[in-house]
Structures are given as structure tokens and as C-alpha cells.
Image (cartoon, rainbow, N blue to C red):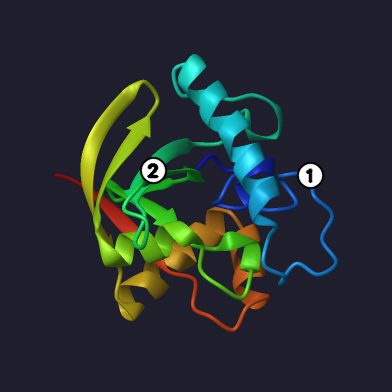
């Protein structure tokens, strides 16, 4: 993800406040329908513009992650911010500090095979959830570049998971 104003935004592009929905408390679970609608707009814009989006995410490094729904077996697309750290593609399950993991985390834990779109390139990946020691070391690097993720961690009792996406 680019360092700067956009770096403090949620990893889940549509997680409030990015979706424009009002939230009483940043640790509330985001409104699913608002997130879906906002994310669908981002996905369409991303695909129409070779992986670029405008507005509040104009300078953000975004990817589209397609997982398989753990219960439904249906494809699920999530636009996410990502970081490249030591040549590794890292995504963060912050959900803006909500008390629960985003659905894509549950899906990757159930089935780590997924597809990623970065720019105009699409490829298959296998997700690897980082163990606590590795997660902590990389999370420190992420929060140095994007302090908003430290704020999200402070808002929740859960440990925000990190995943490395490895080309399959």
C-alpha cells in the first residue's frame, strides 16, 4: 500500500467509514449490505481501469481477492489494500478494527486457494496465514508505513490476522 493519507484506511476497501455509512462505534461490525454495494462499485472501477480506482483510494495499492465461500462454495470478491514486504504479497484482515474477522479471512482459512487481480494481471494464489511471531514482525513494518492499522488493532480484542499470498 502506498504511504500517505490512503495508508491509514481500512484494508477492506468497503469497510466503514469508507463505504460512507454512519457508524456509532468503530468496533461495531460493519453493515454488510453497505459494504457489498460499495465494494461492487470499487470492483467495477478497478476492472474498467486496469486496476486503478479514483476518489479516496486513488493512490492506494489495491487488489481483488476472489475466495470460495466457506459455506456457500460460491466465489466471493473482496477489494483489499496490500503491502509488498521483502518481495511478499501481504494482506491484512483488519475489518477497520471490528470485533470479528472479515468474511474473506474465514474463507481463506477454510480453503486457502484463491485468485488475485493486481492491476491488469490475474493469477492463482495459495494463502498462508502468518504465525504470531512472523505476524507481529511484519505488522510492525505495516504500522510504521500505515499507522491506521495500529489504530484498528487497538480497537479490537482479536489479533488482526496477516496472510501472505503465494503464487500457485
Q: Which residue is mark 2?
A: 65
- Vertical placement of residue 117 versus 115, above or below: above
Task: List x then y, in percent, for residue 20.
Answer: 79, 44
Residue under circle 1?
A: 20
**Residue 46, position in %: x, y?**
51, 25
Q: Residues within 10 Å of mark 1 (few under 14, many from 20)?
A: few
Q: Quadrant of residue 133?
A: bottom left
Residue 59: in sight, yes or no?
no
Quarter assignment of residue 167: top left
* Residue 144 in sight from this viewpoint: yes
Q: Residues within 10 Å of mark 2 (few under 14, many from 20)?
A: many
Depth check: 119 or 106 in front? 106
Q: Quadrant of residue 18?
A: top right
> Going 42% across and 37% down the picture, which residue do you hit?
64
- In the image, taking residue 68 as reference, residue 35 lies left or right, namely right
Q: Secondary structure at mark 1?
A: loop
Query: Residue at the location (69% across, 42% down)?
Result: 5
Q: Position of residue 11 (x, y in %)?
A: 54, 52
Along the viewing direction, whichever of 58 and 121 lies nearer the viewer: 121
Amino acid at each position: 500500500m502506498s504511504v500517505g493519507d490512503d495508508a491509514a484506511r481500512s484494508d477492506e476497501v468497503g469497510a466503514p467509514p469508507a463505504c460512507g455509512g454512519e457508524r456509532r462505534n468503530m468496533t461495531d461490525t460493519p453493515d454488510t449490505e453497505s459494504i457489498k454495494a460499495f465494494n461492487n462499485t470499487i470492483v467495477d472501477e478497478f476492472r474498467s481501469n486496469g486496476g486503478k480506482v479514483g476518489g479516496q483510494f486513488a493512490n492506494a495499492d489495491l487488489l481483488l481477492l476472489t475466495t470460495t465461500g466457506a459455506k456457500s462454495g460460491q466465489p466471493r470478491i473482496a477489494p483489499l489494500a496490500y503491502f509488498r514486504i521483502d518481495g511478499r504479497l501481504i494482506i491484512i484482515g483488519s475489518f477497520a478494527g471490528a470485533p470479528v474477522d472479515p468474511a474473506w479471512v474465514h474463507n481463506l482459512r477454510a480453503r486457502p486457494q484463491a485468485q488475485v487481480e493486481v492491476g491488469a494481471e490475474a493469477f492463482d494464489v495459495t494463502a498462508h496465514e502468518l504465525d504470531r511471531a512472523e505476524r507481529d514482525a511484519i505488522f510492525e513494518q505495516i504500522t510504521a508505513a500505515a499507522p491506521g492499522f495500529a489504530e484498528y488493532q487497538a480497537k479490537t480484542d482479536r489479533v488482526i490476522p496477516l496472510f501472505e499470498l503465494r503464487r500457485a
